[in-house]
Image: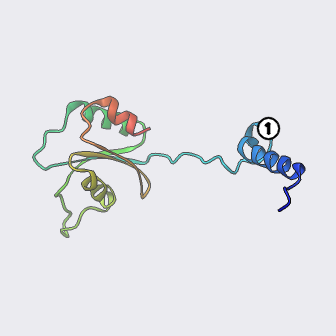
Amino acid sequence: MKKPSPLIDLALLALAGWLMFGGQLGGCNLLLVAPAKVTAVTYVHDEKAVIPSPVLAALSELNAAGIMATTFPDDATDGDGDVPDQYKIALPAAKTIGIPSLVVQAGDKVLRTLKGPTTKAEVLEAAK
């Protein structure tokens, strides 16, 4: 079998470099993806749980920054006996890792979950 020309190898390397570093060199930006914007943070807990004060402080700070940050007891329902719409994504995600947990969302997508945060720093870091 005949080995491809060194020019083909060079062309492929140039193309790969252009795709990888195109933003800095004026080429293609196919590999750059904007991070998802956090829209909601929910601390899901047991109905009788005491929510740590630092967690509440962090949720308050997130609300002030324009992110809907709330607490939700894992067995709460609305008037129809269903989970309220705003928690239909957060509750199953929290139950997957265990209660209490923090669920960070971008719209209807779960970005990350954190099992049992107790500090303000943990909550704020998860919401980044």
Identify the residue at image location x=89%, y=49%: 7
Identify the residue at image location x=42%, y=36%: 65
Q: Tell me the amino acid under the disc marked 1.
A: Leu
Identify the residue at image location x=19%, y=62%: 77
Q: Nearer the viewer, residue 111 or 80?
A: 111
In the rendered view of the protein, which quadrant contains the C terminus? top left
Q: Seen in the image, is 66 located left or right of residue 47?
A: right
Q: Seen in the image, is 97 located left or right of residue 106?
A: left
Pointer 1: what residue? Answer: 25
Where 118 sits versus 72, above or below? above
Q: Secondary structure at mark 1?
A: helix
Q: Nearer the viewer, residue 42 or 13?
A: 13
Identify the residue at image location x=34%, y=59%: 89
Q: Seen in the image, is 77 located left or right of residue 112?
A: left
User: Which quarter of the picture shows residue 115?
Assistant: top left
User: Percent x, y for residue 17?
Assistant: 76, 43
Looking at the image, what colour scheme do you see? rainbow
